[in-house]
Image: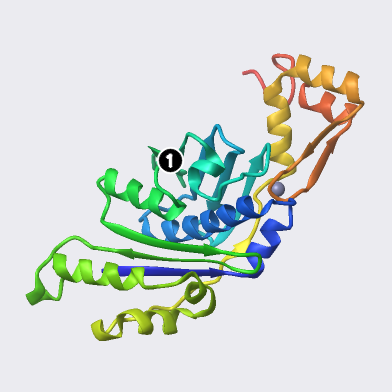
Amino acid sequence: MRGEWVHLDEVWRQLQARADYPLPVREVLGQALAAVVLLSATVKYRGSLILQIRGDGPVHLLVVQATPEGTVRGLARWSRVPEQPDLAGIFGQGHIAITMEAASAAQERYQGIIALEGDSLAQALEGYFARSEQLPTRLHLFSDEQIAAGVLLQRLPGGDSRLGEPLNEDWQRCSLLLDTLTGQELRDLDAGSLVYRLFHEDEPRLFEGRPIRFHCGCSLQKVTGMVRSLGEEEALSILAEQGMIEVTCEFCNRQYRLDPVDVAGLFVSTPVGSGNSTIH
Ligand SMILES: [Zn+2]
């Protein structure tokens, strides 16, 4: 078996400060953020991992991303404040998509989609692991205004006690131990204390941790690429209406402004045979 533990404080406070999230939305966003870090730590994949939830309820979109460099970002969009704090009350009918972005051209992008089922995000994600032929996995997630935290326990392939590999009963026992964990403990205990408190009889090994930080990968280059993809006609019509094309990144609130000269530069048509090319 192996486990992952995550505790986000400053990163989580930075992320939630970008919007005035109502309590149930903030809570599930923090849990999703902790979850995406746990998931990215378990997959053998070099690209970034994105967890996205779409639904027809009060919160229609939640997206969180973790990169292999240890950076995260995320946001949620809601049309009204959820009245019930369970998944269905927050998202209505919906689905979860887990996407692993290709890190290079040699890799393929992978996406798994599951229906949004269960009372909590942790339950829904456990269902994802159960259904996608992944390894049996248990998750606990917690978030409040200060802390987003989570722990994941995963059963590795094999099952030979002579080799020290877990048997089904070991897995059951450790899952039950994990279930005794309270949100308060997840919030307050460090990794070492938590592992000791739950699994000290199994002589667990604790590995070195690594820091996670908030970082948004948006750039002027990406914004101009997006404007270019709108097409010249559309871009000019926005300019005619607003005098300027303004794009605000919803992950980091950074503002990008393109004036008419910038926009004109995007759509310069290069006549054939011009520039540096030479004809022999
Ligand atoms: Zn940004």
Quadrant in the rendering for residue 109: top left
Location of the C terminus by quadrant is top right
Q: Position of residue 61 (x, y in %)?
A: 59, 39
Q: Nearer the viewer, residue 238 or 178?
A: 178
Secondary structure at numbered mark 1: loop
The relative height of residue 38 versus residue 270 in the rendered view (above or below) is below
Can the viewer see residue 269 in this picture? no
What residue is at 25 percent from the left and 63 percent from the top?
Answer: 155
Q: Position of residue 225 (x, y in %)?
A: 69, 32
What residue is at 43 percent from the left and 78 percent from the top?
Answer: 208
What residue is at 56 percent from the left and 53 percent from the top?
Answer: 28
Q: Position of residue 134 (x, y in %)?
A: 27, 50
The relative height of residue 259 versus residue 251 in the rendered view (above or below) is above
Horizontal arrangement in the rendering, residue 165 relative to residue 270 (left or right): left
Location of the N terminus by quadrant is bottom left
Q: Mark 1 and ligand 1: say if the CB distance to the nearest ligand atom is below 8 Å.
A: no
Q: Position of residue 137 (x, y in %)?
A: 31, 58
Per the image, the residue denoted by label 1 is 116
**Numbered circles on residues, count:** 1
